[in-house]
Amino acid sequence: MKRQLPVLMGFAFLLLSSTEGWSLPPCPSERHPTNSPWSDCFGTYTDASGDKYVGEWKDNQYHGQGTETYPNGSNYVGEYKNGKRHGQGTYTYAYGDKYVGEWKDNQYHGQGTMTHAKTGNKYVGEHKNGLPNGRFTVTFANGDKYVGEFKDGKRHGQGTLTYTDGRIEEGIWENGKFLHAKKPSLTN
């Protein structure tokens, strides 16, 4: 235990000081791309259109953790890389829809959940370039449920749609339409 004490004290020091002294310094009061570019600092900037960003900066771009609010009431809270939403983040639209998940170059990309406020439908799965692509589970507000593949935002490939009344459509989907039922497997 005596040997572990210095290690434990060092670890405790790191934990306690993580909220003090390790945050980025404030950005300069004026932001100018060449005279005083913002880098390795924390600042607030509102552009001409009214978009407001509060967060970390690197090389005069949003980079790291930040929050962006838009004049229409939408907002994004999450990670940025080179001025774009990139990494984990939550985008809440002014009309109530919400996406929570992975981003790449300002688009939904990777695992994420989209919840539609108006319909109550919930999409959970893989996104690529802003659209559902890959395996998804869609739970509809009325209780129906689709589990299967998506391509370019539409049901495409193997999938099963289970209705609340017990009906099941299981088989191949193409461009959002059910084509045919899955063929029964032959067993010997």
Image: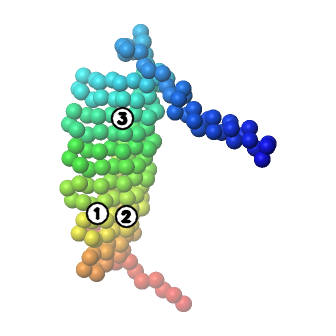
Q: Earlier in the sequence, mark 3 or mark 2?
A: 3
Q: Viewer-nearest of labels 3 and 2?
A: 3
Q: Judging from the image, what secondary structure is the residue with disc 1 in?
A: loop
Mark 3 vs mark 1, CA separation in Å: 35 Å
The quarter of the image holding the C terminus is bottom right
Question: How far apart, in angstroms, are the residues tagged by discs 2 and 1?
Answer: 14 Å
Amino acid type at mark 3? Thr
Disc 2 element: strand
The residue under label 3 is 67
**In this rendering, the label closer to the viewer, 3 or 1:** 3
Residue 141 spot, x, y in % from top left: 24, 65
Residue at position x 36%, y 29% in the image: 54
Residue underneath mark 2: 137
Residue type, numbered disc 2 = Thr
Q: Is residue 108 above or below residue 162?
A: above
User: Tag 3: Cα neighbours inside 10 Å, few (<14), some, or many (≥20)?
Assistant: many
Say which label, 3 or 1, has the lower sequence index: 3
Residue 130, percent from left and from top: 35, 47
Q: Nearer the viewer, residue 32 or 182?
A: 32
> Residue visible at 36% across and 13% down?
30
Q: Residues within 10 Å of mark 2 (few under 14, many from 20)?
A: many
Image quadrant in which you'd find residue 91? top left
Residue 176: give its label.
1
Name above or below for residue 69 compared with residue 33: below
What residue lies at 35% left-to-right and 72% top-to-bottom?
A: 160
Numbered disc in front, either 2 or 1: 2
